[in-house]
Image (spheres, grey):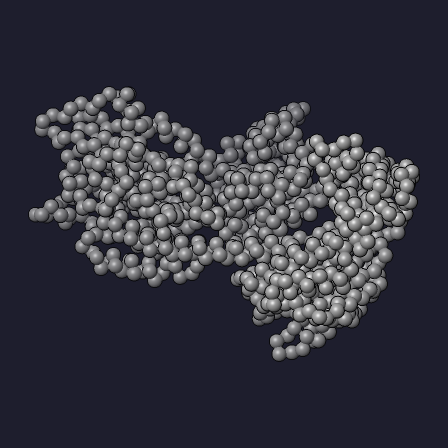
Amino acid sequence: MAARREQTESMVAESNSTPRPADAEAVPGDHPTGVGALVRLALVLIDRAGRIAQWSRAAEELFGHRAEVAHDRPASGLLPAVEPLAAPGQTAGSAVRRRCDALDTLAALTADGRPWAGQLAVIDREEHLRDVLWWAWPLPDPFGGLLALAADARPLRTAGPRLALGERLLPFAATPPARGGFHRLGAALTPPGRLRAGLLSADRLAGLLPAGSAARRALLLDVLDQAGLPALRLDPATVLPVLPADPQTAAAHAAAGLGRRYPTAQQRAARVGPPPQPEQSAPPARTVRGRTPGPLPAQRETAERSAAAQPSGAVGAPAGVPPTTPAPTTPTTTTPPPTAPSPTGGGAAIEPAAAEPPANGRPPRRSDQTPTGAEGAPSGRLSPFLTNGQAGEQLALLNEVGGKVGTTLDLGFTAHELCQVLVPRVADFACVDLVDGLISDSELPAARPDDDTMLRRVALVYNETGGAWDHVLSEGSLVSMPRRTPPGMALQLNQPVLVPVISADVAVDYAIALGGARLAQVVSGRSMLVVPLSARGTVLGILKLLRLPDRAPFDESDAATLKELAVRAALSLDNARLHRAEARVATTLQRSMIPTRPPQIPGVQIAHRYLPGDPKAEVGGDWFDAIQLPGSRVALVVGDVMGHGLHSAAAMGRFRTAMQTLAALDLPPGQLLRHLDNLAHKLGDDHLATCLYAVYDPINRTCELASAGHVPPVLVHPDGSGELLEIPAGAPIGVGGVPFVAKTIDVSDGSMLVLCTDGLVEVRGGDIGAGLAALCGNLIDPRQSPEQACDVVLKRLHSDDRKDDVALLVARFDGVAPSEVATWDLRVDHREVRRARSLVREQLAGWHLEALSDITELLVSELVTNAVRVARDRVRLQLIRVDKLLVEVSDDNHNLPSLEPAEQLGETGRGLTLVTKLAERWGTARKAVGKVVWFELPLPHA
């Protein structure tokens, strides 16, 4: 094993299998040699504004969100993630799994300007947890933003990566190690400069990058090369560079040639001319024109006699189509006489299996070789699994479907149950492809399925002993079904389509419909049946079945029985879809009300956790919040609406929105709770909630708190001792008639404030004091980060048997150094504008921020001018330097300024327009007396 590992490393390190002259320069883009891992990579590009600029097809398949939905929307909140964090002495597998946002987490991990590679579990659109390997690069100027690549970790760790060896990048399968398989496989980065050294192919990697000019792509590729390109770490000693693999490339090339290989009826008539008239002794030619099929007729005897008289030209069409009903909108195929060559038909046209032997070498069975009895019925051949004479087995199958399909309300599991019932009993291959719009959209599509309708493969089951199926598209893949294919015909006509035997000349077409052009040799000679899944007047998708040549092909009796089976299964699938839509509404409501990422506020570090009482519902009445206030202050909120379920979650959403609105008015904590209590009375008597509201001032190092019947907070001092703060309890919000009294305390830098709901500290059958006592003990080490403190608290106090929701918020108070704050009181005099510019210039020079002097002086001049114009007694200017430059101008006039359209502005009133254009962020807020206008500027890079 060690020798093979060293050999692999040496092959990766080689720049070329042909010795390069010593004085020759490495050219980027030279075909590499050695070993690389072929991985299906999803690309996500986030622009400077935090919006998604590109969402690749592979990202659609991996995460479930369509590109048109993800494009140009805020990246934050799109991909919920679950990050396992191991507490001290705890393994990662048993660690508390906390909710976060994947793209926000990637932005935080790359905030220092360095790339990151690793694993982060993501919850996709179907609410399934996916282990995903990530590679993320922060993009410098002139690009900006974040570039992320992702790969599904499960198939890589289950079967191992496919390897590319040599200049032609031939794929090989990796052999798992003797112990443990590929469970240690992880994401890594190559050493910088691999492309410049000619060790990797620039062309293959460039095809994955965002669209743009060749020069821009080359520049971006050089940036990634200097930071490190994606790689897989198989074990601590083996790292393979990653090459993007696209399994649909071959299928796309094959599909592009279908129009030329399979011309339409008009093209064939123009090319070949009208077919010759048959002789008197020959059977007359039959023209079969498809239409929307009706009931399935019994025409086996006629079909067999016709097939026996004609050596080629059998036609596949929707099962049960009468041969004389015209429909000019569907594909038309004409069967020529025996003396004429058999042209290749378009759409679902097939030829008898005797045209050429199947891929597995077994002789196919033909209907003209089947002996018939006295009444013309088949008697000497292997009869199909389902026939008119086996009604008992048909009923048994339908009964089994009723008992085994739809046992849960999970859409994917129900589709798997359907496929597992059919394989290998009825077919050797079964897959369920559902319309992607039905899965992603809350409303049913108004239009019928067409050639552009995208289907998502939700279930796939096959007989592993029956042949090679490894090239079939995996679950979650997006496929399109044109009308010329049997699946597309079944989807658009909402009728089963039967192809008794797939001939070699149309195998490519059917292979593409099954998921890959490389299946052409495998599917040749097999039998296909496609049944639509329709429920409540809506076509949900299709069920595709395939039989190997060693079994009797599908017939119309099979199609009739499986059509009835599909109707029953479709109802179960639709019920699962409706249930998931309802659950998604509740989950979306909850997630929209609970922040996923702590805000970045100077002087304080914040972490939070939320654990619903019912993990399946993820809906409750607990909430928490952190709201930035003027003067770098922060408001910390924890509340608990009485009750559980969706009703409590809706009430919680109202309280949280009201709390944010009242906090924006900068009211004292006691007054704010009084206004919230008045609002609860207007909403109804059933809106009762406990709440704790605290305002931390990092400059004065004080914290003002008020409680409405909530669990008291715990203050952990820098020495590690915990103190249960004695705050006037008040009454819950909604009771009324009880005053809310605030209390102000001094806090030291390095102390922590722990706020929680009663679900964390209340023990069933015990006193809440026991949980508070444990929280006040030496449970939290002040040297820990708030994230670590949250994990320790949940591990020690929370148990899975608790049925109440838990909200936990931990804030570490670091304060803002006095040297980083400058405050001046200005007179209400226009001459103070010049003084304000001078004060700003001197202060920025003392902070070595001369690069920001011009723009800051301009904006301060505009805001002070506005403040002096409306103020009655005083104006205050304050500068705060933290991770950014924060400038605030406050006055005693409570009227907030408004931004006017540019065309309505005269010589005055352009101050806010300049602030909007030049500042990174800005805003206005009311204070207890007056208002404040603020803006932020990023600090220049060192």
Position of residue 234 measured from the top left corner of the image (x, y, whole percent) = 58, 47
User: Is residue 186 something one can see in this rendering?
Assistant: no
Q: Nearer the viewer, residue 199 or 431?
A: 431
The percent coordinates of residue 244 (x first, y second) are 54, 38
- Which of the pair 438/192 is nearer the observer? 438
Residue at left 69%, top 73%? 771
Q: Is residue 638 above or below residue 131?
A: below
- Residue at image coords 36%, 26%: 260
Q: Quadrant of residue 99?
A: bottom right
Left or right: 556 in relation to 13: left
Q: Residue furthest left?
A: 374
Q: Position of residue 742 (x, y in %)?
A: 79, 66
Q: Is residue 522 left or right of residue 384?
A: right
Q: Position of residue 297 (x, y in %)?
A: 20, 45
Where is residue 135, by image quadrant? top right
Q: Quadrant of residue 615?
A: bottom right
Quadrant of image for the C terminus: top right
Residue at figure coordinates x 71%, y 52% from the top left: 599
Q: Is residue 919 visible?
A: yes
